[in-house]
Image (cartoon, rainbow, N blue to C red):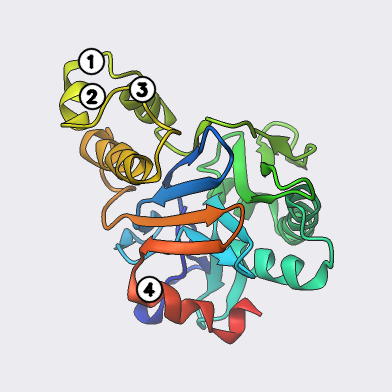
Amino acid sequence: MCGRLFGAAWLTLSLFTGTCYGTSIVYVISNDGQYVVFAADSRNVDPSNNITNNEACKVITLGNDTTFYESGTAVVGDRQGHLLWSSQRAARQVYTANKNHDARTLAIAWGKVAFAWFDRQSDSDQKLWTKSESRVLANGAFINYDQNRNPVVFSEPLSYDAQTKKLSLPEPITSSRAGLVGRGGDYQELVAEFMNAETPRAQRAYGTLKVRYAGNELGYDIQFVQKAIQFVIDNAPDKRFVHSPIDVVVLRRFGGADWVVRKHNCYIEDTQPSHK
């Protein structure tokens, strides 16, 4: 997954550029449901042009009550520098267009926008964006609190079948419960290894943190998600796709979103017209 690529990063001999893969997302829903804390790495990659950038904004907030993260093909542009597809732009559009901001409604609306755009593209382009394999082409996940003030997570995966040459869009997938440690994007097996702390390298990565303690205290959970992402960065078999710095945000039941760590350029991207 990647954020926007700017300037020379758009220049290519092909029609499309900005085909991006690789992300690591980890979040913790507290045991009492009072908060959800997220962390994400910051590398975007365009494999077709061998371009990398460590300033990607893989988690954003919407209206201070919703958090959105993306994976898969997150942005596509053309050689003239026009932004053709942006997962985050679609998220901002559906959030603005829908008075109902519950996560499931937003995920369904995002999925429809994603399906409509990718369905218009040629089969060869769809193969390019999925590495010519059957896989999830793009994924958007919305997290907020429902009308009963319970934390909810809905993700919408748009998949491509290389044999049938068709896209599929299932019902949004929910993974919400108090005390949940969730993960998204690539290298989820490494996040699981860190969570279980059953290997020497995972135990070393915990340092002074207690093992299997997530969900009890915000300060701990902030360190936990940061260490989990760092573990992925340190141990990913292909280090082209994940990299520091690590962004961290807390979404609270009462109080909205607070950024613990965030790159300055991500605040600037929040104001870009292309996101409206």
Going 36% across and 22% down the picture, which residue do you hit?
212
Give the position of the C terminus as an image quadrant: bottom right
Circles 2 and 1 in contact, beta carbons < 8 Å: yes
Q: Is residue 26 left or right of residue 65?
A: left
Tag in front: 3 or 4: 3
Instruction: Name which of mark 4 and mark 2 comes first in the sequence.
Output: 4
CB within 8 Å, label 3 to label 4: no
Is 216 on the left-hand or right-hand side of 90?
A: left
Label 4 sits on what residue type? Answer: Ala
Which element type, helix, strand or loop, lies under badge 3? Answer: loop
**Label ID, residue 212:** 3
**Residue count near mark 3 (Cα–Cα under 10 Å), binned few <14, some 14–19, many ≥20:** few
Which amino acid type corresponds to the residue marked 3 in the rendered image?
Answer: Arg
Give the side of residue 118 with respect to residue 64, left or right: right
Q: Mark 2 = which residue? A: 202
Determine the residue positioned at 54% across, 84% down.
Answer: 272
- Mark 1: amino acid: Thr
Which badge, 3 or 2, is on the more N-terminal residue?
A: 2
Residue bearing mark 4 = 9
Q: Residue at x 49, y 68 (%)?
A: 14
Q: Where's residue 139, x and y in %?
A: 61, 47
Could you tell me how far apart the alpha carbons at marks 1 and 3 are, in whole angstroms?
14 Å
Residue type, label 2: Ala
Distance from Cα at disc 1 to Cα at disc 4: 39 Å
Which callout, 3 or 2, points to the residue nearer the camera? 3
Q: Earlier in the sequence, mark 1 or mark 4?
A: 4
Whole-percent x, y for residue 144 in the image: 65, 52
Name the residue beneath numbered marker 1. 199
Callouts 1 and 4 close, C-beta under 8 Å: no
Residue 240's place in the image compared with 196, above or below, is: below
